[in-house]
Image: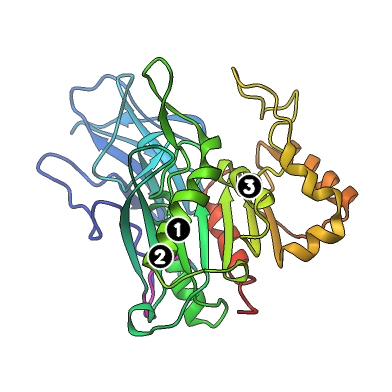
Amino acid sequence: MKYNTFFQTLAFDRVLPYEGQVECLVYEGGKPFLQIKAPEAVKVNFRYEEVDHYCTKDESGIWKTPYTATSAMNYVQLIVDGVELITPMLPISYGYSRPYNYVELEMEDAFYGIKEVPHGSVRREYFQSSVTGEWESCMVYTPPGYDETYKTYPVLYLQHGHGENEMGWTAAGKVNFIMDNLIAEGKAVPFVIVMNNGMVQKVDESGKRVVDFLLFDKYLTEDVIPFIEQKFRVGGKKVWRGMAGLSMGSLQTCLTGFAHPEMFDCLGVFSGFVTDIIQGTELDLPGREVSSNEHLKILDDGQKFNALFNVFFRSMGDKDPFWESFAHDDELLKEKGITQVRKVYDGTHDWNVWRESFKDFASLIFKNV
């Protein structure tokens, strides 16, 4: 059985070519190609893995290039005569702070694929935020059987990375299918997943709308958790709550989890950062003061830290551009005597690594509830 590679946020069924257009991802001789019909275009290319792949045009006006990425999922940017475009002929997610196409290669029996198992539900919720003063929204996964029982479930607050939003973990991460499959195989305890937009927006003193991801701690603890735990049969105490995130979301996990150890039993740091900003590295952000890393004080008593969190999980792709930060945190945690589950996967800073990270993390947590 092949994974349905064409499921996307806006359409479950594959998008059929409209009049005058062609399939974007095609296979010839068993190899994938990307193509687009643009008879009047002068230059067409697809950008992925930070490289431009230029197309050649045939007599019918179809521009084509081999698709050389070998990992299952990659963001892809279509560029026609220098203009970045979104094509309806590829799945659409949200990345780089805007809607973005991606390519999902067909994989046999993928652990993130939709299979013949009981399926949970994905719901969108809306609530008023006291922190932002505006309406906000989050996505909530409930496991199979949630609506047929009256039991209380553990809950994981799961965050995306920089430039993404609350749709990322379901649209690109396929986290709901991963959970369905893990539960069906008896590899994970059923739990609810809450996915928020970590790119918290506010209006600054000049009246400009800006993103302040450091607002997330207050937003999560004062708005999201009370709302979720009043509406859903979840959490209510430390041993029934966890937090995890990828990249920026991993730092938010450490900032919030370390500051509120009384709230969370397990923490997952995917392709991520325990230390906020390391001076002189790629983590330095223009216009931002060097962090005091106050949240790291909890590490000073390694024995106490190990007792506070039942699972502390860290992962990284072996080709991740932020490996220097990962190695720095390795040394810090070793020095402090911190017990951790540490995983390294084949990949870079992308969803292929984050899907694997979630799968392994999910199989470890809430085993004692």
Q: Position of residue 299 (x, y in %)?
A: 81, 49
Examine the image and state in which quarter residue 359 appears.
bottom right
Q: Position of residue 338 (x, y in %)?
A: 83, 56
Q: Disc 1 or 3, which lies upstream in sequence? A: 1
Q: Is residue 142 visible?
A: yes
- For the residue pair 102 and 168, the one nearer the viewer reads as 168
* Rendered residue at 38%/85% (across/down): 149
Q: Is residue 118 magenta?
A: yes
Q: Amino acid at mark 1?
A: Pro
Quadrant of image for the N terminus: bottom left
Q: Kindly identify which residue carries mark 2.
A: 230
- Could you tell me which secondary element the residue under label 3 belongs to? loop
Left or right: where does residue 297 sit relative to residue 161?
right
Q: Is residue 150 magenta?
A: no
Report the Cα–Cα distance between label 2 and label 1: 6 Å
- Residue 247 lies, with reference to residue 146, above or below; the image says above
Q: Amino acid at mark 3?
A: Ser
- Residue 45 lies, with reference to residue 304, above or below; the image says above
- For the residue pair 324 and 140, the one nearer the viewer reads as 140
Tag 2 near tag 1, CB within 8 Å: yes
Report the Cα–Cα distance between label 1 and label 3: 28 Å
- Could you tell me which secondary element the residue under label 2 belongs to? helix
Tag 3 near tag 2, CB within 8 Å: no
Q: Kindly identify which residue carries mark 3.
A: 271
Quadrant of image for the C terminus: bottom right
* Rendered residue at 39%/69% (across/down): 232
Q: Kindly identify which residue carries mark 1.
A: 226
Q: Tell me the magenta residue range.
A: 112-119
